[in-house]
Amino acid sequence: MTLEKITLFDTTLRDGQQTPGVDFSVEDKIAIATMLDEFGIDFVEGGYPGANPTDTTFFSKKRTQKAGFVAFGMTKRAGISASNDPGLSQLIQSKADAVCLVAKSWDYHVKVALGCTNEENLESIRDSVKAVVEAGKLSMVDCEHFFDGYKANPDYAIACAKEAYEAGARWVVLCDTNGGTQPPEIRDIVSAVIAAGIPGSSLGIHAHNDTGQAVANSLAAVEAGVRQIQGTLNGIGERCGNADLVTIIPTLCLKETYASRFETAIDKEKLVGLTRLSRAFDELLNRSPNHQSPYVGGSAFATKAGIHASALLKDPKTYEHVEPESVGNFRKVMVSDQGGKANFLNELKRRGITVAKDDPKLDTLISVVKEREASGYAYEGADASFELLALKTLGTVPDFFAVESFRVMVERRFDSHGRLKTVSEAVVKVLVDGETVMSVAEGDGPVNALDIALRKDLGKYQSEILDLELADYKVRILNGGTEAITRVLIESTDATGARWWTVGVSENIIDASFQALMDSIVYKLMKNRELAGQIAAE
Ligand SMILES: [Zn+2]
């Protein structure tokens, strides 16, 4: 039996950007588009060219290799021709392969929001789709408020969808914009649309999660015949979020009820990258991953001590609905017995570190990691720090250098022109090869000054760290108030293209940053000697 294809459409960069607290820079957008493209999503929607400088810059180049690169915008305004509509021209002139137009399909919104007649709205849909098709781009139409519109006026909602389809839209996407529609309603309304003459192979679903059913609604739509699903990474989006592609993709791929009928661009091999994709995206958003996320959460395959754990060790399938490895996650048995130890040994092995199961240093390492994690360290996002901690505990890290002391000064004052200035200066004393070296540096802020001073003179190691670059610096406050604990995560890279993450935790942000910077430098020196970096080099 041939499998039917479900097309995957990601709108993280457009609808996901509506999430409170999320604001992507051009660099963020490029990084996310690349992640999605490499993972294998069919379409990546990037935003609104012409609407703001970030999106205009983003659409000045095609940002995907394989995925369709999609621009989003409105249908033309009533009363002017498609060729005279400035918004529509921006979409057509962008470097996108496809244009997704948002169209009103609820007569109430046509009257109130657009202030035009129902007939004028249909004409806008028709002429805008035709203009996109004539420009040689693939055309899609998001029918906004489709399900609520259908309930209010089914004939008009269907007329809007048909107008788009007949004008040449490759995909007509039915949107549950308010997110309140229930799965049986989705199924019935999609069936009515198909019965009215739009084939399911041209229909998409765009569901919001306001009743916690965006994923269920997307699957109900597929059940009724829809063949494109729109969603976001980790389900981000305004209010309660959009349909979570990170949940939908493995469900389609691993659950027999779908896998026996459908296929997506994400095959079993690509699916192994899912957990990494989800966590890397959270890192980019600077937020903690949700431990309870289906498939990819840290707790998704975790079992607490007790009868479950022992049964789990005998036969993992007894307590798992899919194999954790199939989505790149792993099993966690949270006990400090043989089971816990076995997990730990696996983690070390993954990094090329071998240690005997009965080595007392292993017990020391396990307790140090547990203690540190309790005080705020997060080694999941800081591979290099974990590796260093393991190697130090097992006694295999050379003493490259020692920092005798550092001092950071921040001065806020008015300069001679009466302008407010903040000056940061750091002094670092380092002991290398029995010799004390002192470096002083100014920087943009205290952490930057400390970084520059620390890396200014490392004696005989200086030439080795010249290509070390800090790619990213993230601060997370772990509990509120002024006595909060600060966790700093630093991403470093070097000329080989390797990337590694280090962590520091302290009540003092400078101290936390210092720990993470030190780890990064020591890791780099270890990596240069091929003593570390199994993961980073992969
Ligand atoms: Zn939406």
Image: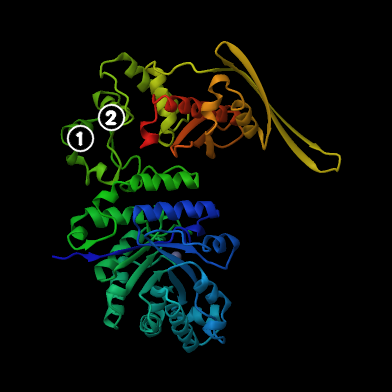
Q: Which residue is mark 2?
A: 346
Q: Which one is in front in this view, the residue at disc 2 or the one at disc 1?
A: 2
Report if residue 24 is visible in the image: no
Q: Is residue 151 above or below residue 448?
A: below
Could you say whether the residue bearing mark 1 is in a helix, strand or loop? helix
Residue at mark 2 to residue at mark 1: CA–CA distance: 16 Å
Amino acid at pointer 1: Leu
On the picture, is 50 further left or further right than 329?
A: right
Image quadrant for the C terminus? top left
On the picture, is 397 further left or further right than 93?
A: left
Q: Which residue is mark 1?
A: 312
Query: What residue is drawn where x is 16% and y is 65%?
Result: 2
Mark 2 or mark 1, earlier in chain: 1
Q: Picture quarter containing residue 194?
A: bottom left
Percent of width and height locating residue 486: 55, 33
Percent of width and height locating residue 225: 26, 71
